[in-house]
Amino acid sequence: MADKRPAKVRRGRPRQAEVARLAGVSQTTVSLVLGGNKQGIVLHPDTRARVLEAARELGYVPDPAARRLAAARNNLLGVFSFTATFPTAVEHSYYPFLVGVEQEAAVRGYDLVLFTGSSSGGAQAGAPGALERVRLADGCLFLGRHIPADELRRLVGHGYPAVHIGRRDELEGLAWVGADYVDASAEVVRHLAGLGHRRIVLVREDDDAPASTDRERGFREALRRGGLAGADPVVRAADPASEITPAWLRERHAEGVTAFVAEETDTGAAWRALLAAVEGAGLDVPADVSLALLGSPPADLAGRPRPTGFDIPRAELGAAAVRALTALLTEGEAESPLVACAFRPGSTTGPAPAR
Amino acid sequence: MADKRPAKVRRGRPRQAEVARLAGVSQTTVSLVLGGNKQGIVLHPDTRARVLEAARELGYVPDPAARRLAAARNNLLGVFSFTATFPTAVEHSYYPFLVGVEQEAAVRGYDLVLFTGSSSGGAQAGAPGALERVRLADGCLFLGRHIPADELRRLVGHGYPAVHIGRRDELEGLAWVGADYVDASAEVVRHLAGLGHRRIVLVREDDDAPASTDRERGFREALRRGGLAGADPVVRAADPASEITPAWLRERHAEGVTAFVAEETDTGAAWRALLAAVEGAGLDVPADVSLALLGSPPADLAGRPRPTGFDIPRAELGAAAVRALTALLTEGEAESPLVACAFRPGSTTGPAPAR
DNA sequence: ACCGCGGGCTAATACGTATTAGCGATAGGA
DNA sequence: TCCTATCGCTAATACGTATTAGCCCGCGGT
């Protein structure tokens, strides 16, 4: 037979068109049978059966790319991190978010795009338009400290659905989910007050991140409500290691301060300084003084006794971010919820010593 | 002139057509400028510049689905896991792979799509065509124990570029990268031999995973080459905890066995049993007996002394997988390399005691 | 005989990008 | 002067599926 065409070896997968040919119907019908048929178009049961049989026989599987193209959405959620995306060093702070994000995305039928953002050595790292790449996804989650505010503003200004993990009030129009540091910090203070502590000091770093401000606010409010307001109970230390000394601590202790609270930061400097100072002063924890940490201890201190304080529910935060983002996608708007932190009893607090 | 109308406030991402309108050229030209222009069609530099400027201004990003459909490239690599993707329990075994994958992908200019595979509760978990979703990406990495072999065979049979992390010989045509357990295990034996141990026993679980078989092979070969072959040096224990007892251990020790080696498995059962037995027998490590572990210790034993043995270079394995996959994409074929494990001196081995 | 109606199906088109074929204009050679 | 050969660009189409608009047919009502 003169080749009117090499019979088109149909290498590759069968299309709806082939199924249609085999079943003796149109491609549209195949789409209706195999796709959802959300239009409620009526088809004869026999036709349905024939199509299903033909599809089974050919082993038809829909092409995801075509499907997504036709649906005008990708079912992809982006994850963009401003810090190095997967550095071993922050393993413990980034990964838990991802756990929650992944699980919630799976439940809702989305896949995830990890933008190899500003991660070390990334090909497009730091390029001026690097952020624009996220438009590939239907919407995107952002996390990290150092946001390129202008670029992000542009994106949300264009109506791109974006959710930031962590409070971000200053960026008008950007949705976010955050941890309720105010309430969690207050709870730690209430716990100390319940143990009889009347004078409590907060050691924080000299930095005005929202996370720090919120903790201080919760701390102060709880003091006030507990009737514990006194001389200024907050110490700002630019370099905790050199300012929070054994001498300083002994002095506070002599004044009647029986509990010290440190805020958590990436370095954990305030907490480390506090631990060192207490040890240097020869005081016993929790017999002489109680210590609390407004957050989780740094990974390298995992072996030490568990500090009293709270844990940031990172996985839950990730899940909440996905919920907010999908709400943006389907309803067009999302609220910015605060997720409660979990109180951690720990073993660094005890009853206030009798005077 | 009529077509110079101001771009209407489009919801959603800009298309090539909009870029074209803004730059005053055709969609084709935009595609030529922004796509690779592999046809070598000549364009005036000024035109090129106008298009680039317009694209930048609108924040244009190509639609991955459309790209894919038009039989081109995405610059997206998929990652599909058969185990629950991010279960907290395997945190330490899955995440390190991702670190390597992400970094290598970033270097090569690919972004990552995390398919929310068979992860617990996933919407499309277990659906017959769930695997086909990966076709959205140019190629895909697979990892996990329980592979749906039929579906995967189908994918690679149709020429889809796939690389498995972990040796996978039985699936014809599937590329993989794996750790060289044979050589790493042999090195541990050589280390022991160098310390003067003449009789060494391997405790393994009763399971025929490739990872176990490879370790045993390396172990036996090293014994043979070291002239240490003797009575059968390998113990298979279906339930190590009840079979590796202090009595058993004492008996072996009396026979002249001075070093015990355990294989690593997910549970670490063999290693745990060995530790318990040695302690129960009242023997000192490493003065009386030396112990080694063919892998990394379970996370919960991190506090204990570091076992002599080797570490599986998970990040490096992830990076190697990406290299193999990109080779598949660009050259059409890739070898399946073995990555060397890193010897870990540890502190559980010492010179063989004088008899 | 005409209309209306609903059941059962399909032709046409949209989705966004890549590729192919080809068009108009200018320049150089005979 | 005519013929070719670039150069610089565009119209048309393919990719596979989902959706929209509608076609044809038989039937009951007037």
Image: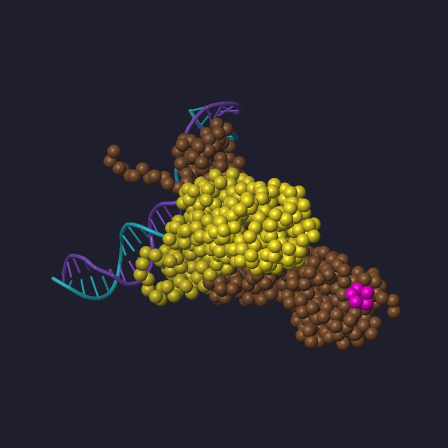
Chain colours: A brown, B yellow, C cyan, D purple
- Nearer the observer, D25 or B46: B46
- Nearer the observer, B355 or B283: B355
**Please, is residue A282 above or below residue B219 in the view?**
below
Q: Residue at x 84, y 65 (%)?
A: A352
Residue A328: % across, % down: 59, 53
Q: Residue at x 42, y 59 (%)?
A: B19
Q: Which residues are magenta?
A: A284-290
- Nearer the observer, B292 or A319: B292
Task: Give the quarter of the image for residue A57.
Answer: top left
Residue A292 visible, this angle: yes
Please give left or right for residue A184 compared with residue B320 in the image. right
Residue A157: % across, % down: 55, 61
**Please, is residue A277 above or below residue B228 in the view?**
below
Residue A222 visible, this angle: no
Q: Residue at x 64, y 66 (%)?
A: A266
Residue lying furthest front: B355
* Most common secondary structure along the magenta stretch: loop
The total number of labels drawn is 0
Residue A285 drawn in magenta: yes
Q: Quadrant of the C terminus of chain A?
A: bottom right
Please give left or right for residue B250 compared with residue B14 in the image. right
**Please, is residue A67 above or below residue A86 in the view?**
above
Residue B205: % across, % down: 58, 44
